[in-house]
Image (tube, rainbow, N blue to C red):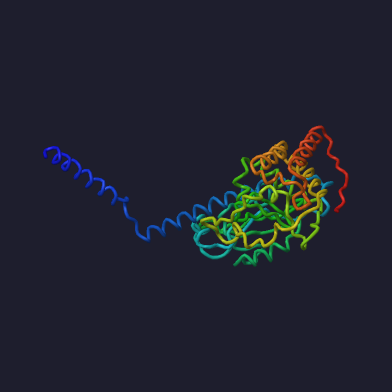
Amino acid sequence: MIKKLIHIFITIPFLIYVAGCATITGPSVTREEIERTKEELKVKALAYQIKQLQRLQNIGNRLMLSIPKEDIKHPPRPSLGIMCFPIDKYLEKVYNLTTNKGVVIVVVKEQSPAYALGLQPGDVLVSINKVKINNINRFRAVASNFKIGDPIQIEILRGNETLTLETKIGQVPVNLPITMVDLQEVNAATDGKSIVVTYGLINFAKSDDEIAAVLGHELAHAARGHVAKAQGGKILTLLAALALGIAAESNAPGSGEGIMRGAGQIGDFFNASYSRDLEREADYFGAKFVYYSGYDVDTCATVEERFAIEIPASMIHNFLSTHPSSPERVARIRKAIEELKAGKSAMPETKQE
């Protein structure tokens, strides 16, 4: 009897303690607190996306400026070196803007007239050549008339201060906008007018050199005047083959309008292909562009090795009957790197199949 009572006295407090623990779930939060945290995370996510976009533009611009003239099949293009977006409530918070209307500079490319002029991300465009910039369409209309060497007067709002700056429109051998797309597959593509890079590729890349290797390939397609064989010029690079089996759309928690496009906004951008010979040529000249830009050219081969090893789907033979297999690409790129380092940079003209 005594043993039973002792057991009861010990068990009851224990059960009460366990029951009490089971009902404790930590401090409660209100719906308002949850929404406030959600908005805070969106702003932080957008700031991170902008940082990656700036990184892409700097790498791409450095590559573009390094392309040898003899490797380009069209005249140089005008460039000021900025990317602008319409102000929304998230960009307003990222940059602590004093206005919620108009157009804000989000990217200032290094080695550009805008960079030399001292323009900064977060500057709000007021006017260009005394033309008021009230919205993004007005900016695009004004920018479409830029010509190399033209003088330009830019009025900006920085904090509470209005500044008027003057410079001249610069030039780049190839001027391709680089856009991030909200996909987790490891991919990049170009239609000759712009380059699309997936969020998955940015996260996959271990260094700026690896991103440069990918962008160099895409720039080679544009600089060499390659034309897609099918579907109205929409182009798929081999990197889509490398990403087979890991494609999974995701929605980033915060996106200012246009900072990172959703998968639905690029349509079938990834659904056509170049001929095998043009892909090989893009590999060769892409490595050449990386070499001349000062990035680590050996990465052109090692990143392909990573694709082949870490994404086995890239080993599929004759992907879409247009792209060389990864083993062939790695072998060819290695040899191209050897030739570049030895001072041999000539490649026979490639005809499209």
> In the displayed structure, does residue 129 sit left or right of residue 228?
left
Residue at 70% x, 41% y is 304
The part of the image, by quadrant, that contains residue 309 is: top right
**Residue 132 screen position, x and y as percent:** 62, 67
The part of the image, by quadrant, that contains residue 259 is: bottom right
> In the displayed structure, does residue 234 sit left or right of residue 128?
right
Residue at 87% x, 51% y is 351
**Residue 14 screen position, x and y as percent:** 22, 43
**Residue 84 screen position, x and y as percent:** 62, 58
**Residue 166 screen position, x and y as percent:** 66, 55
Query: Is residue 150 among what the camera can see?
Result: no
Q: In the rendered picture of this protein, how many numbered marks are placed on residues?
A: 0
Residue at 62% x, 51% y is 185
- Which one is in front, 192 or 308? 308
Outermost residue on the left side: it is 2
- Which one is in front, 303 or 216? 303
